[in-house]
Image: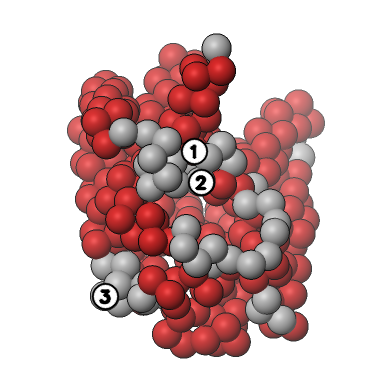
Amino acid sequence: MTVLTENVRALYGFSRGTQATLSVAQPMLGLLLAGGGSPGRVLLCGVAAFAAFFAVFAVNDLIDASIDQQRFDHLREFDGFDIDSAGVRHPLAQGRLSLTVAASWVASLGAAALVLAALLSWVCVVLFVAAGLLEAVYCKLARVTPYKALLTGVMVALGGCVGWFAVSGAVDQPVLWLFALWLAAWEIGGRNIVNDLADVDEDVHLGVRTIPVVYGRRLSGLLACAALLVAYATSVGMMFAALPHFGLFGVAGTVVAGGYALVLPGLRLLRGCQPQVALMVFNRASLYPVVLLGMALLGLVVHQLTGL
């Protein structure tokens, strides 16, 4: 039983299971914004997203295995909870998983995601494949350019839009574009830059070119804060655009939740860009799509019951 538990923990860490599970909220919110769907279609979208995110996060560790092996020679010097490290941090690099098992895990999850996506829409298949390819390109650019951060924004936006296209083929709706911009800005400011700020000492030793490594902590904090403010503005605008679905409660909940999860942490970065602060911003921002999904669901219920 101990061996089985350790293997499960290793696979969970390989796919960054907590972060991957939280990410399922992104396409599910896209589905709601598009008007929702039948219970069966909602379940199908959720399972497809679950498999896809577990595969994509694992692809990162699979491609970066050699870099991650070197990473353990220069670990960051501070302690702090990191959502990304729940389970086992980089288990393939640590030898906790074999390359065969790791590759089989990615291939199995990827195949399952594509089959399920095909049952939703061919557009969903294209979006999942595009997101996976962007993840691979991002990893290959680790030591090439800091501007790979922009790719993560596009990648996350594409993954979230799977939920929209699972129930709608419309591409001319303002709410869709606000949704995509929100996801891109949230990923760049709330996860990518701040995560790199937390790991900057490790990345310097590894020769990984990130925005904090190339441009310094101060400018990186400013860029992250700006992206978080864009994410906040677009999330509120998105909910206003979807007012007929989620009502005033959905908008109000978005304003409050975004202020706590995005604006306040972003402003704290302006006062200091220490790794501990960056990790706090990362952890709090990672929960935001789940909170926003909850606000949308509550707003939907309240609007249907009261008309507000």
Residue at 61 percent across and 47 percent down: it is: 83
Mark 2 — residue? 89
Which of the two labelled residues, at mark 2 and mark 3, occupies the earlier sequence position? 2
Circles 2 and 1, Cβ within 8 Å, touching? The answer is yes
In the image, residue 146 above or below residue 94: below
Cα separation between marks 2 and 3: 24 Å
Callout 3 secondary element: loop
Residue 100 got which mark? none
| Residue lying at 53% horizontally and 40% vertically, measured from the top left | 88
- Identify which residue, 243 or 256, lies in the foreground: 256
The quarter of the picture where residue 290 lies is top right
Given contact means CB atoms under 8 Å apart, are the residues at marks 1 and 3 in contact? no
Question: Going 65% across and 62% down the picture, which residue do you hit?
Answer: 279
Residue type at tag 1: Gly
Q: How was the colour assigned to the protein in this rendering? A: secondary structure
Identify which amino acid the numbered label 2 is placed on: Arg
**How far is mark 2 from mark 1, CA to CA?**
6 Å
Closer to the chain start, of discs 1 and 3, is 1
Q: Is residue 282 visible?
A: yes
Q: Amino acid at mark 3?
A: Val
How would you rate the neighbour count of disc 2 (Cα within 10 Å): few for under 14, some for 14-19, many for 20 or more? many
The residue carrying mark 3 is: 144
Residue drawn 20% across the image and 33% down it: 122
Vertical side of 129 occupied by 48: above or below? above
Q: Position of residue 188 (x, y in %)?
A: 48, 66
* Mark carried by residue 13: 1
Judge from the rendering whether residue 68 lies leftward or rightward of residue 62; answer left or right. Answer: right
